[in-house]
Image: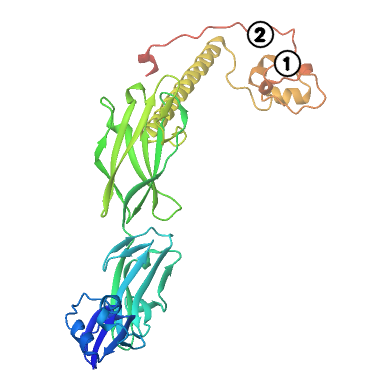
Amino acid sequence: MMYIWFKHGIYYGNGSILNDRDVDITDKGGDIICIATDDPDCKTSLQDLTPGSTLNTVVKGHTRCKDVLGTSDDFILQPEYGPYDIQLIYDDTNLKPGEEITKRVGEELTVNCMSDCNPACNISWYKDGKMRSSNQQLNLPDVQESDGGVYTCTVYNTHATRNVSFILDLKHAPEEIDSQGVDGVGVGNNVTITKTIYAYPVPIIVHGSIKAPNGTDRDHINFNLINTTKAHHYNVELRVCDNSTDYTGEYCIDVQNEDGTLTLCYDLKVNGTGASSGTGNTVIDDTSKGDSSGIIGGVLSIIIIAVVVVIVVVLFKRYKLNRILARKENGSPLIPDIKSSPKQQINGGMHANVENLIYADLDLNEPERETIRGNPNNRVVYEDIDFTKKAPPYVPSIEKDSDDDD
């Protein structure tokens, strides 16, 4: 009796016992069938079979074997094996072992771990020795800074255990996120142009990289990195103080962290009616915010006002002194007697020394009296003034030399 074996319809071996010492996962699902014959002519015909021969060739191509072949029922080969062909699927992509995934804080991360096993495998996810998931899917709905690191998928069954890992990297080179455009800042105003970036870890401004139009005063140009309310988002502000048409042009600065460098450029146009940014920049009238030059200007203004006040006070005192000296030379009393002061005279009904009213502390609360229109601070009781009284002659003040003053 002659026995010949076929797997997937292809010559697989001969003999009454199929002996394959190298069964592996590629044999999974192999349908195996055995044919047998005791016919001498058929045996002779089948002796020249090669590894490429097929069952169809034997049945239909060997006429000597027609009606003399016995065929067994087929059976399926199901070898058992440990984890095989582990795959980490991220965004429909198969990650390579040790590959990095870069995410921003607040974003979602989902990675699926898949493997072929027989019997079926158990799958778990670990980070820093701690289990994060007991199924094939790792899901981080809101990635935080503490989530960065190495994640390992462990796949195991009764035959073997295998691990495969990836790295979650939260470092992110500076990247421009948002910018807008606004017009309407006049010449001489302070201008702030803002761009928003995302970066992790915290970036720095490389001040030595500043590029500005020729002829601009670098003391009037400043770049600032401003924190925002959103994690790892920053505003990079260009401030141009006391700008003029000479400041029209492009301003550039490098912003960098350990993961990379970003060059930000700002277009500023200054003219007689206003300043405008290029598309994508925010221009804000910043005159209310102030700067070092504004502070200096404010201090100078205060000093000038103080000097003016002092000069006015000195001149007023000199004027009063000249008046007193003039009255002294004219024989008029310098200070009235308190007991016979004009106020006492008015209140007591005495009007003999009407000329002394120029010294009076006039009673502005005198009820039901007619008043003379004039400066409200110098309102005078109408019926208490003798308008027939002539004023004393005016004596002009005499300027004295500085030596006499001394």
Q: Quadrant of residue 364?
A: top right
Extreme residue toward the left, this view: 48
Per the image, label 2 sits on a secondary structure element best described as loop
Q: Residue at x 36, y 21 (%)?
A: 245
The correct choice, above or below, for 197 with respect to 308 in the image is below
Q: Which mark is residue 373?
A: 1
Is residue 121 left or right of 284 when viewed as pictured? left
Q: Nearer the viewer, residue 392 or 80?
A: 80
- Three-letter amino acid code at disc 2? Ala
Q: Position of residue 261 (x, y in %)?
A: 27, 47
Q: Nearer the viewer, residue 216 or 71?
A: 71
Q: Which residue is mark 2?
A: 391
Q: Earlier in the sequence, mark 2 or mark 1?
A: 1
Tell me if mark 1 has few (under 14), some (14-19) or many (20+) residues whose alpha carbon lies within 10 angstroms of its own.
few
| The C terminus lies in quadrant | top left
Q: Residue at x 24, y 90 (%)?
A: 39
The correct choice, above or below, for 373 with respect to 206 in the image is above
Q: Position of residue 230 (x, y in %)?
A: 44, 53
